[in-house]
Amino acid sequence: MDGFVFPNEAEVQWSLLIVLYPFITGLVAGAFVVSSLYHVFNIKSLKPVASFSLLMALSFMLVAPLPLLAHLGRPERGILIFLTPNFTSAMSGFGYIWLFYLILVLTETWLVFRPDIVFYAATTSGLKGLVYRTLTLGMGGMSEEDQRFREKAIKVLAAVGIPSAALLHGYVGFLFGAIKANPWWSTPLMPVIFLLSAIVSGIALLIVMYVVVMKVLGRPVDHDCVASLARWLMAFLVIDLAIEGLEILSMAYESEESWEVVSQLITQKIPVSYFGIQLLLGSLIPLVILGAVAAQVRKGAASPAIFAAAALVLVGVFAMRWNVVIGGQMISKSMRGFTSYTPPLGGREGVLAATVLLMLPFYIFSTIVSLIPPWQRPVADEGEAEAETPEAIPAWEGVDSRLRRSDWDWEEATRR
Amino acid sequence: MPISRRRFVKLGAHAAFGGLLVYTLRGVLPKPGAGTADAEVDSAYDSYRPEDHDWAFVIDTMKCIGCGRCARACKQENGVPWEPGCNRTWVERYCFTADGEVHVDSPEGGINGFADEPLPEAIRDKEITKSFFVPKLCNQCDNTPCVQVCPVGATYKTADGIVLVNRDKCIGCRYCIQACPYGMRYLLPDEGVADKCTWCYHRITRGRLPACVEACPVGARKFGDLRDPESAVSKILAERNVSVLKPDMGTKPNAFYLDLDGAVV
């Protein structure tokens, strides 16, 4: 503690878990936007990660409410946010927006992977086969008409998903931006800043995960795709940095009463995580790397640099969440002092709990991709590149040759 | 018989002790008709109509002596945990030094008073030009950020203007604690729910004064009904210079400060 803080401000109320919450929902929003760039705007270079990013969004989506729930003083009453919402509260929308978005992501994932599920259901036996047959929801066959409807539905859902992603994460920004009692939070730009940094972090994680997963599986990395992601990352990062910079610049230039305490916060309390990590390491350096890479696109060679830039961006966005959530609470409402916060290692809101929560989406992701690997689609969509032929995949030895893509016959296959 | 000086002092001491004894026992011994007094209080509560009242608080910082009795009385009356960080009301000490600096402190919310509280290190050797105490309590705002942000409607404003928390409904998200510009709310450590000053709602609805008002030995805290033009608070608001804390927040507080220094937040 430093200076005078009100007696009830001895402790920071929103802990590390609340730093995690906007970080995770941001990754969801960002990953979904990439998926939609392919499905709606038909950006072909993103095809290798289109369904990959969808599964990533789903994995993080499932974990998103957990840090909030774990943080509640009375977690067993968390359901009240659905049952008796008070609609003047920004937070009351959380349950509904999350649920709506979850249904959207789930439905789109199911539709995108439906041919895969139907294929696996028809070709897999045992417990795993049962899982696939359950996932078909009793719709084991696919007619031409089904197929046309499915393609249309995917496009519509992906299109709806873009404003929804904006809603989901813009809303998280509003949660903070609407608190007039806190000069570091209270700005109408907050939803925009949160949304842009969400997209930035989602693209960055997608680059990191895609490259790592491909390396681990020993599969080739699509360098065109990574380069395309890098360009999108750079574009959103520039806008994000510009808005964040404008925000702090206008605060400093106008120098209202609250600037005194805000300037002390960023120069004395969080200078390392703000200037050092969020701005320099997590924004400016990646921007320089991405810019340099974009200037000399040589296939393949650029990927390690892009990977490094993406990893730095992720660190930077996490620091940004920390600086907003924790930094804001360090300012006493007396405007005459600061409280401090160091997360404990153990406990419900400690570093270990946060680490487990942050690892959980990756575990969920690995479970999902073991069922429906997005990099090894057995059935290609109309107009898409050829699906990998089962011959190339050893695990598929013994699969009835009638099920191969070349002579794929839905009716016959699903009659079994 | 002339009364010696010694005997006079002795008599006086006896009288004083006797008076003190009677004064003390008055609260302990059953009074005649004590049962009916309770019944009166209960019937006062039964006939209490929230919509007939508009409660207000006036704090006179020039009168406060920083004894901390209000803060202690509040903790006892409302079962507020004694640990720091749990305060429904507290007292701040403002010290202005000759070099133009302002120093504020409120150790443990001032529950121990400031008589034995040494000055902060930073100003111990400086010339203090001005100093006063500022009692703080919930402003029971008309435009309540805390009620606005509660996601489940666990906190609400009564018809007589008091903001209360339903402990059976609060989920402990602490959004209200973030939203209150005055730092009035805190989380009850054992219950995991938000808590705040209620102006002793259980007392004022039974025709009594809030505990802090009753405990104040100098009348620095005044409480009353603005619907009653003859009440002390009504008269002060009509005749004196009052202000509220952080008026720019637009919260429209119902706690008013008499002749408040501009440095107070």
Image (tube, rainbow, N blue to C red):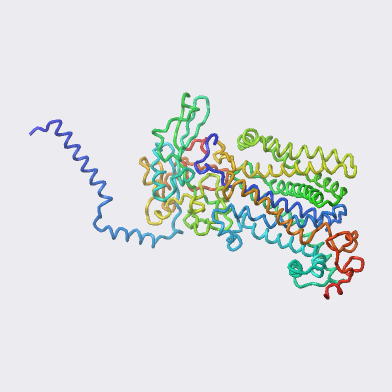
Residue A373 appears at what percent x and percent y?
80, 59
Viewed as shown, does residue A265 lie left or right of A123?
left
Q: Nearer the viewer, residue A225 or A196?
A: A225
Q: Nearer the viewer, residue A313 or B73?
A: A313
From what the image shows, is residue B191 above or below residue A135?
A: above
The furthest residue to the bottom: A415
The furthest residue to the right: A406
Viewed as shown, does residue A163 lie left or right of A340?
right
Q: Is residue B204 visible?
A: yes
* Residue at (42% x, 36% y) in the render: B62
From what the image shows, is residue A324 above or below residue B31?
A: above
Residue A140 appears at what percent x and percent y?
80, 72
Q: Is residue B230 visible?
A: no
Q: Nearer the viewer, residue A212 or B155?
A: A212
Residue A405 appears at what percent x and percent y?
89, 65
Q: Nearer the viewer, residue A364 or A74?
A: A364
Residue B215 appears at what percent x and percent y?
37, 45
